[in-house]
Image (cartoon, rainbow, N blue to C red):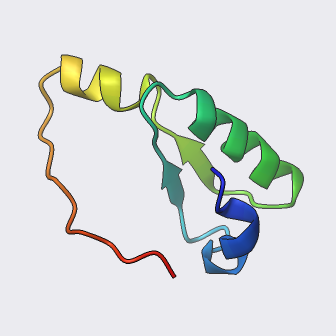
Amino acid sequence: MSQVAQRISEIPKQADQPVLLICNTQNRSRAVTEALQEQGFTNIRYVNGGMSEWAKRGWPMVKPPSQVTP
């Protein structure tokens, strides 16, 4: 959430390119979704319940590789 403004050019704005946001509980991803929609992004969604709900349901999880922040 803290990097969205600096990295907005990396987020596809075309309606045919879906963007799915997820955080731990959905609160931050929902807020970012709403902010991006206000800026004209049309195919932005968030995962209802976030990673907490995902894990609670036992859905598969894969740890991402270590990332270097630009």
Of residues 33 and 67, the one nearer the viewer is: 67
- In the image, taking residue 63 as reference, residue 17 lies left or right, namely right
Rendered residue at 37%/77% (across/down): 68
Relative placement, left or right, of 23 versus 33 is left
Q: Is residue 2 above or below residue 54?
A: below
User: Image point 76% across, 54% down: which residue?
Assistant: 36
Q: Nearer the viewer, residue 24 or 42?
A: 24
Quick one: which residue is furthest to the front in this view?
Answer: 69
At 19% across and 19% down in the image, what residue appears?
A: 57
- Name which quarter of the figure residue 14 lies in: bottom right
Label count reads 0
Please indicate, yes or no, whether residue 32 appears anywhere in the rendered image: yes
Q: Is residue 14 visible?
A: no
Residue 1 in percent (x, y) is at: 63, 50
Q: Which quadrant would residue 15 be assigned to in this image?
A: bottom right
Residue 51 image-quadrant placement: top left
- Residue 21 picture location, percent across and down: 51, 48
Q: Is residue 66 left or right of residue 36?
A: left
